[in-house]
Image (cartoon, rainbow, N blue to C red):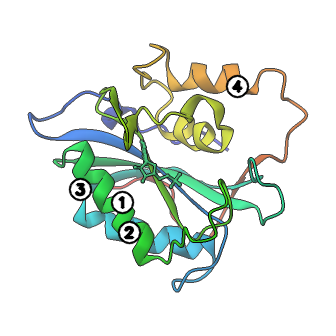
Amino acid sequence: MPGRSCTLHSTGRDTLKSMRTAYIGMGGNLASWAGPPAATLAAAVLRFDSLGRVVCRSSLYSTEPVGFAEQPRFVNAVVELETELEPRELLRGLLALELEFGRDRSAGIANGPRTLDLDILLFGGLEIHEPDLEVPHPRLAERAFVLAPLNEIAPEVIDPRSGGTVARLLASLVKGRENESDAVVRVESDRWRPGRIV
Ligand code: AMP
């Protein structure tokens, strides 16, 4: 299947003074009130309209749980968002959406099952190091379930931490892991239309 690169919008630089491009990672492996994980991601991305404009969506991916294995596979995707919000305002909005879709942290299992997880992966080429907000996302380079969908829509975008492209991060990660072929698998759903949104 061909890539769906959104390079026209994915330079990672500001297009207008106050408009910046953010890449948001989405994932879930438990049903929410909106339905199974693919339906939750589809419903949640519509709610991003309150945060900015979604200009591109990756495909959905079925991915193996990382860290805590005794749980269902996840559904993951990445979207490109043009936003006028500051990073911290965007994070606040994303955390509110996680709650709206039933995210429950009470079980307290790190990397455990969840209805919806939303992460700021990259934000306008910025590096932020604060106790509750780190951009690029601290585990970006380690997670094929994030890098595969990000690479699908933004392979040439620069990770400001390493100075390399997203494509290079993914290539470094998958090197030597060729036999983990079912870890990250592209899937289709009639609830989710990938590609550029015009
Ligand atoms: P998680 O359990 O993975 O959903 O972690 C959520 C917490 O991670 C949030 O409360 C944030 O304060 C913190 N965090 C730090 N950096 C980021 C980021 N780039 N995107 C999302 N959450 C972040």
- What's the residue at 16%, 47% (across, down)? 84
Which residue is tagged 2? 97
Q: Are marks 2 and 1 in contact (CB under 8 Å)?
A: yes
Residue 197 location in percent, x, y?
36, 55
Numbered tag placed on residue 52 in the rendering: 3
Which residue is tagged 4? 173
> How many C-alpha atoms fall within 10 Å of the one at disc 3: few (<14), some, or many (≥20)?
some
| Vertical side of 127 occupied by 100: above or below | below
Which residue is tagged 1? 94
Is 11 or 137 nearer to us in this picture?
137
> How many C-alpha atoms fall within 10 Å of the one at disc 2: few (<14), some, or many (≥20)?
some
Judged from the image, the secondary structure of the residue bearing numbered disc 2 is: helix
Q: Amino acid at mark 2?
A: Leu
Judged from the image, the secondary structure of the residue bearing numbered disc 4 is: helix
Q: Earlier in the sequence, mark 2 or mark 4?
A: 2
- Spatial separation of the CA atoms under disc 2 and disc 3: 14 Å
* Ligand 1 is within 8 Å of the C-beta of the residue at disc 3: no
- Spatial separation of the CA atoms under disc 1 and disc 4: 27 Å
Residue 154 location in percent, x, y?
46, 34
- What's the residue at 65%, 73% (across, down)? 30
Look at the image and tell me in which quarter the C terminus lies. Answer: bottom left
* Ligand 1 is within 8 Å of the C-beta of the residue at disc 1: yes
Q: Nearer the viewer, mark 2 or mark 4?
A: 2
- Spatial separation of the CA atoms under disc 2 and disc 4: 30 Å
Residue 183 location in percent, x, y?
80, 46
- What's the residue at 30%, 27% (across, down)? 126
